Image (tube, rainbow, N blue to C red):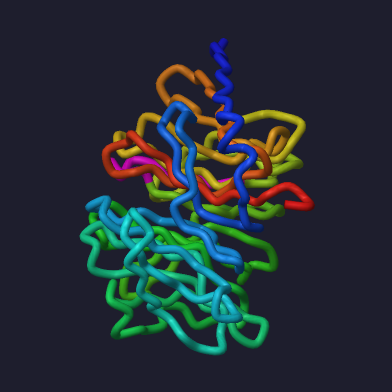
Amino acid sequence: MRCIITFVALLPLALANAQVRRTDIWVMQRDGSNARQVIGHPASDEEPDWSPDGTRIAFDSRRNGNNDIFVTDFSGTTLRQLTDSPAKEDHAAWSPNGEHIAYQYEWDGNTDVYVMDSDGLNKRRLTEHTARDGWPDWSPDGRWIVFSSERDGHREIYVMHSDGSEARRLTNSDRDNTDPSWSPDGSWIAFSSERDGNSEIYIMRPDGANQTRLTQTAMSEARPAWSPDSSWLAFVDGETRGITLLSLENGQQQLLSPVDGSVSRPDWSPDGMLILFERRAPTGQ
């Protein structure tokens, strides 16, 4: 029987009363303290992904109309736009060596996985299917990319070589499986699945074996993200709209509620001390 310990980190009143835009990117300490905004704009800034060296953040933004991918330094002062097309481009994921960024490209009702150099050059398409492919993440050695696809009629988890070849399915259920995230030690892929009703967090081996459910609640959990040492998962808690940390060693859970409003898309700093997340302000803010 697993032990569950819950901690609630409260944001200081002054920060809670600060002016916050509709969706911005924030950072907090690993325990939920010292939450602060790092990237913001009157348009939405979403889905942060920390570079492997910890110096840059990739994210998508609608600040120029449709979703495009940007990169900034941690201070948010040096900004570079990497994509600029009529398509919607989002879900950026750094390669382990920091030289490439995989992302989702949506156009004319369909989505595919693309990759580009980290400076935005050499964009190339990795998947080409009539169904929607997206939500890419890299294996720690950079040889593989895991992604979610609707080519079976609903979302399943697939893996392919980083050049887009030899795609094969890892999950096989009659409900959606999405949000794949490869553990830094290469041993597991975390994902969310609705196979047992509402969305819950699962893990499996990189070949699809040992698919194991980690959460079991009345609400939906999603967006799992690994700690750098592969010992913890951060994910979005459907009941509180906060972020929960789950220990893979003993099942302990820590609920982090760092800000007023709902939060999503956690991502750990390479040293494991900080967690990026996107924050959607309550109605009226």
In the rendered image, the vertical position of residue 98 relative to residue 260, given as above or below: below
- x%, y% of residue 174? 71, 54
- x%, y% of residue 239? 72, 34
- x%, y% of residue 139? 32, 55
- x%, y% of residue 158? 48, 61
Q: Give left or right: position of 139 versus 129.
A: left
In the rendered image, the vertical position of residue 180 relative to residue 32, given as above or below: below
Residue 224 visible to the viewer: yes
Residue 152 picture quarter: bottom right
Q: Give left or right: position of 209 versus 7.
A: left
Q: Nearer the viewer, residue 224 or 26?
A: 26
Q: Nearer the viewer, residue 198 or 64?
A: 64
Q: For the point 51% across and 78% down, which residue is it?
A: 105
Residue 213 visible to the viewer: no
Range of the magenta residues? Answer: 183-192
Q: For the point 69% across and 46% down, which residue is it?
A: 194
Number of dots carrying numbers: 0
Q: For the point 58% across and 26% down, which residue is it?
A: 10
- Give the dominant element type of the magenta stretch: helix, strand or loop: loop
Q: Nearer the viewer, residue 161 or 42?
A: 42
Quarter of the image with the N terminus is: top right
Q: For the point 57% across and 15% down, which residue is it?
A: 4
Residue 245 located within the stretch drawn in magenta: no
Residue 13 picture quarter: top right
Residue 185 located within the stretch drawn in magenta: yes
Residue 160 picture quarter: bottom left
Q: Give left or right: position of 48 versus 54.
A: right
